[in-house]
Every structure is written in structure tokens, then in C-alpha cells.
Image (cartoon, coloured by chain):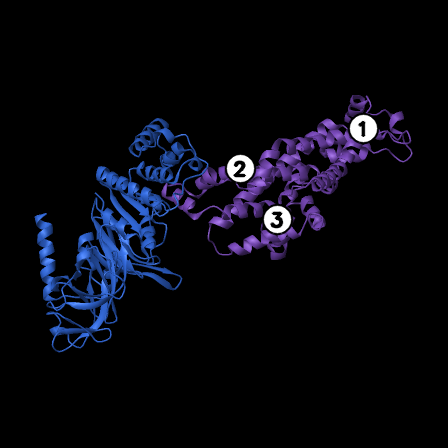
Amino acid sequence: MTTITFKSVKKRYQKTPVVHGVDAQIQSGEFVVILGPSGCGKSTLLRMIAGLEEISDGEILIGDTVVNKLEPRERGCAMVFQNYALYPHMTVRKNIGYALKVAGVPKLEREDRVMKVAQSVSLETYLDRLPGQLSGGQRQRVAMARAMVREPKVFLFDEPFSNLDAKLRVAMRSEVRRLHRDLGVTSVFVTHDQTEAMTLADRLIIMNAGRVEQIGRPSDVYHNPASRFVADFIGSPAMNLIEGQFDAKGAFNHGKGGRLSTESGLALAGRKITLGVRPEAVRRAQAGSNGAVAAVVDYVEELGASRLIYADADGSRLIAVDNGTGHLPSGTKLHFTFSEQDVHLFGEDGRRIETHASAARMAAHANKTINA
Amino acid sequence: MIERSRIFDIVTYMVMALGVIVVVLPFWITIVAGSQSLAEVSRVPIVLWPSSHLWDNLAEAWTRADLGPKLLNSMIMAVGVTVAKISLASISAFSIVFFNFRGRMICFWLIFATLMLPLEVRIVPTYSIAANALMPFQVILDTLGITGLVETLSGLRIDMEWNLLNSYPGLILPLVATATGTFLYRQFFMTIPDELVEASKMDGSGPLRFFWDVLLPLSRTNMVALATILFVSTWNQYLWPLLITTDRQHFGTAVMQLKSLIPALNGTQDWNVTMAGALIIMLPPLLVVALMQRWFVRGLISSDK
């Protein structure tokens, strides 16, 4: 089957580097999502696989073949574009069948394959319409059918759902999942929407400013972010990130005289550290209980099932997920606590610092996934 | 602008009516004069109501100006120029818009500059090239000394000549070489989204296939608009056919023949025949515009994408 291998792949436009050397391997049949903010080089990377952008440096292999010098049609990839990119003057039938026509597939076989693919995305009643007469979701399905009909070795998706409304996006997401399960074709999907990424991906490649920040399964990325950027980018609401320093006793000093006592800080005394903890891991606590942090409520966001408390802990912003009810006017003084295991530490360079506690959590998580 | 006032309505209708009269009156006079007998057309004051001699006058004009073959010549010239110009324009705009090569902008501006040089300005050099289309090559070979070299080596003298006078290529080719079409096509091709190009690359079609399967069908309305304009303007060409054809008998065009229908100073003043001839000669462009009108307007406002 088909793997995709990146060997220190770089991309420059004139002199400006946009992708700074990507090394990664995508397994055969895997669904990989490249996630990152806009301008991080994720689409460029995808277009380099497709052959729409030249590779400035390094190599991309599809299967065992180096594809750097191959034309797009010789690479066996099919691509779904953000703006559908359907041929406006061709009917749905002709749009889907165009690649086969170019490849010289005889008319009867072509009709047959177009019909089959159209059925799999439930488009068979729209075959004689023009793209202009279809809704956004239908057009996107035509685009997917057009990609599928060639039976490619690799599917490439370039932010295909960003023009659809929220509800349709969810529906298309499950459709893509189903198609991937049925076809089992290696797929690369680019998006800046983390929900889309987390729900679709077997593995995530998270990029920032032309570099890979982390590669891993969605749950790994969520539970063990490899860098401050990933911690901040993945998860909604974003992780609480508190800047500060450990003192000689192992307490974390931050903001305007705030202190957090942790066990893990001893070895890190004196270094500038970012301490991260997910809002979901922050709990309300009784005043005076061990390790509780005092904070003043700023405002509360009601989400229905739960609510988010935005609070100020001695000058540092703290967000907590709270299941309680009852009115919390701003200015209310509350106490919060979180367990040692839920703390992530990041050094000055933004990379993760492993501690005993985080290692223990990682082991626990690994156990859980193995048992599951 | 929507105004709901009776006086305003009346004023606009009057302005429109005036415009219609200004445009239609010459046509009307042509039709009227073309349908009158010699006696009627010479009467003073002129009668502005058609008479019954239209058919006789048409027949007379047809034979006197030998319009059958001349209309055919005009048709060959107009269709030839239209087809050649559209092919040239679309393919050159294609290369300028979709390919990234050195000197691309220079090519574009060179083509664009020809817009500023209408045929009338370059008519003398154009004529001398038409007289011998290979002359530029001859001059190059002569100045480089290659002619002399070949002559001393082999005893053969290079003397190239390709005379375009009194021929269809001579009528057509010099009119093909202008930028209007290229410019129009360039503007249209620039509106084609990049993703469409990329999608066709992914579908495995090469550049020419993309041109043929996607670009040309998409530019259909533009093509019709351009064809209409080109056909009419070529049909109405007078100066160039006059220069290039010394053999009026075989290569004269219909518009040139109109001249021969104008009565001589001391001859019979049969303007009725002249007008009937004019009617015949302006019929083909009129038909083309009438038939293409729907497409033509759509192509110029170009919202059909």
C-alpha cells in the first residue's frame, strides 16, 4: 500500500523560507490531519505532496518513489479543494468522469464507475445538473466523488469544509470518516479547525511557522502537548498558561506575588517557566485546603452543560470548567485546586519539560489506551 | 436610478425617440430610395415613403456590381480574419496568462503596443511586406552576408519572394495582427481561479487539453462577442482591400464595389440602384449582429461563469 515519507522537506519562495524542514512518515491507510494556524505552511506541505508546488529542498516519497520531479498526474494523488474547483461548464457526470476521460478510459466503463462513485456519495439523481445548480454541500460531494473516481493511492484534502456552514460541516465530517473507513486510502487532510482535526485524525501533525511542533494521536497531543504552542492551540477553552519561576523551596512564583506549591519544581529553581493546566483539570476547592489558589471571578461564560469561570489569580488569568450552578458575580473570591499530575511545564524555549508527575501521567494514559 | 414621475417619463421617452430617429433615419432613407424608380428618386422634394421597385433595383445592383462573387470574397475575408484572430488571440493570451516564462510581460506589452498602431498608420510597411512576405528574411540574409557567401560557394543566388497581392492571405493576414482579441482574452483568463487550473492538473490533463476542454468552453460567450465585432469590422474594411487588390475582377470585396455603384458625375443619377446595392452589402453584418445579439451582450457583461 502507500506510505508518504517526508525527508527534511523545505520550501522557499524566492529567498523567503516558509517550510523549514519537515520530517515525518505517514503510514499506509492512515488518516493524517495537518493542523496549524493560517500561514503555518500546512497547505504548502500538502501542495508539495500533490505536485502543485515545487519542493525546494529535501524529498517526498509516495510509497518507495521519490516524487520530487514527477508531474501531479504521475503521483497518483487526488485532491479536494477548498473552493470545490469544479468545472462550471460541465455537468456533475462530466466533472466526475473528466479524469477518466483524460486517462482514456472507454466510455462504457467510465459511465459505470461514475455511477458507482456517485451512488457512494448519494449524488446519483444530480448527475445531469451543472455545478451552479447545486448547494455548497452537494458541490463538495461532487468534488469528493471526482477525487474518488480515479481510485487514487492518496487523498489530499485542502481545507475542504471551510466554505460550509457549521451543521453541514459536521455531516461532511462523518461522511469523510465513513469513506475513509470503506476505502482505506492513505489520506492527508489540512485544516485550521481543531475540532475537525481531533475528530477525523488517526494522527495529527501540528505545524507552526513552517515547523512541525508535534506528531501524534489526537489524545496524545491533547494530554501531552510537546510545546507551549501545542498546549495553547489544542483544546477549547485553551489551556491556562501561567508564567513564573520556581524558588528554592519548589514553590511557583507568578504574577503579582502569587505562589503555587508543587512538588515538581525543585530541580527547576531559578528558570523561567510556563506552567500549564487545562481548564477541565482546575476544580473549585474549600478555602484553606491544601494547595488551594485564591482567585477573583472576572466573568462567567455559560455553556449549558457546564460553565467557564474566568478568574484572576494574583495577576494571572485562570480559566476553570465548573459544573456548579448558582450565581457568581464578578469580584467573588473563589479557591481552586488542581492535581500535580495535570500540570504541564514548558521551558523558556517553549519545549515541554518532563517531570515525575507528567511521566506518571503519560504512563497512566498509555496504560489506559492499551487497556481500551 | 428609479424615478416615478410622469414628466420625467415623458422626457426620457422623448430623448429615446430622438435617439431612435437619429439612428434609424439613414437606414430608412436607404430603404426608401432603394425601392423607388429612377423618376421617383430624382423628384424634388424627396418622398420618404417606399415605392414598389425594390426588387428591380436589387437585381440591377446585383448584376451591375457583380455582387455574387464579391460578397463571397468579403465573406471569405471576414470569416478568415475572425477565425484567425480568435485562434491567435486565445492561444497567445493563454501563454501570457498561464505560463511563467522569461519575457512574458515584454511579450504582452509588445502585443499590447500594436493597439496603438492601427492599420492606417503602418499601411506603407505593411504593403511592402505584403508585396513580398519573405522580404524581411531576405534583408537579414543580405546584411549578414549569407547571400553573398552562398552565391560564391554554390553559385546559387538566394532570392526569396512570396507575393501576397491579389490573394486571400494578402487580404486576411495583415488584418489579423492586432491586439484587441488578445487583450480581451487575457482579461477573461485572469478571472479563471487558480484552483481550476490545479484541479485539471490533478485530473491529469496537460496544458493544451486544459485549454481545449476547460478554457475554450468557458470563454464561449466572449468568443461570440469578439467574433461579432471582428466580423462586422472586417466586412466594413475599405482601405486595405483597396490597396492589396489590383485585380478587382477576382479579389474585390463587396464594400469596394459600392464605389462602382455610385453614379458618375455626368451619368444617369440612379441613386436608387446605389441604395439597393448598399442594402445588399450591409445585410450580412446586420444578420450576424441580430443572430448573435443575445450572446454578444452576455459576453460583454460577462457574468456567465
Which of the chains bears the disc numbered 1? B
Measure the C-alpha gap from mark 2 to mark 3.
55 Å
Compared with residue A48, is residue A255 higher up or lower down, i.e. above or below?
A: below
Give, as a three-letter code, the residue at label 1: Val
- Residue A239 falls left or right of residue A130: left
Q: For chain B, give the colour.
A: purple
The residue under the point 70% across, 30% down is B283
Q: For chain A, give the colour.
A: blue
Q: Which residue is mark 3?
A: B155
**Total marks in image:** 3
Give, as a three-letter code, the residue at label 3: Gly
Look at discs 2 and 3 and give the one toward the viewer: 2
Q: Secondary structure at mark 2?
A: helix
Give, as a three-letter code, the residue at label 2: Arg
Measure the C-alpha gap from mark 3 to mark 1.
69 Å
**Disc ID at residue A335:** none
* Crowd around label 3: few <14 · some 14–19 · many ≥20 (10 Å): few
Q: Which residue is mark 2?
A: B220
